[in-house]
Image (tube, rainbow, N blue to C red):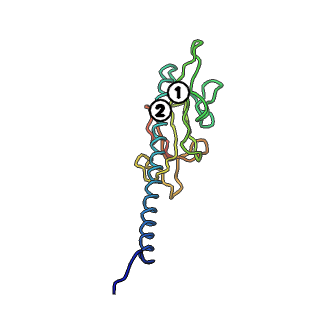
Amino acid sequence: MIKNKKGFTLIELLIVMAIMGILSVIGLGQFRNSQRRARDAARKADLENISRALQLYYVDNNIFPISTNGKISVGDDSFAWGEDSFSMQIDGDTVVYMSLLPSDPTDDSEYCYSYDSSTNKYFLYALLENGSDPDILSCVDPDNNIMLDCNGGIYNYVVSSTNANPNEACP
């Protein structure tokens, strides 16, 4: 007797669907991790660029700008993250240090700037999503509720002025 087999059995189809489901879950998890790492790389680059702008400001003024509620302030102007340019008037001309201050890639957090006029040091703060990033300060321990504080926000990554060590931001 010859049988005509023209399709797949139900068990074969279920096995293939299970394998595809497992591969999808693995692939989706890796995709999300890649997105987190990419956003963290953008945060680090943003803070480095802001730091360069602050150094340029220092060259012109021999002091860093003050901080107001976690924002960079010059005179009466306080610059909002993601909305304003970082600039000032010098001898009637507008000097632009950064055409647009960046904002965090997500709306969950905001960058923070703090300046200590007594030591002339500044710190720029961000919250990285990848908790195992090697650039997170060693003093940060979310399991024991030890995070960096800037203007009431919690952070785990810092860029500091050249005359400071990022670890000085540790509690």
Please tell me which residue is depicted at 57% across the width and 12% down the height of the picture: 91
Query: Is residue 66 found left or right of 5 in the rendered image?
Result: right
- Helix, strand or loop at mark 2: helix
- Which quarter of the figure is the N terminus placed in? bottom left
**Other residues around mark 2 within 10 Å, as few (<14) / some (14–19) / many (≥20):** some
Decide which of tag 2 and tag 1 comes sooner along the chain. Answer: 2
Q: Nearer the viewer, residue 17 or 5?
A: 5
Residue 66, image x, y percentages: 58, 29
Q: In the image as oriented, which residue stretches furthest toward the right?
A: 76
Q: Nearer the viewer, residue 86 or 28?
A: 28
Residue 161, image x, y percentages: 46, 32
Q: Label 2 amino acid?
A: Asn
Residue 128, image x, y percentages: 49, 47
Please tell me which residue is depicted at 44% across the width and 43% down the height of the picture: 41
Please tell me which residue is depicted at 56% across the width and 27% down the height of the picture: 65
Assess whether mark 1 and mark 2 are in contact (beta carbons under 8 angstroms): yes
Residue ID for mark 2: 49
Residue 59, image x, y percentages: 47, 21
Residue ID for mark 1: 98
Q: Label 1 amino acid?
A: Met
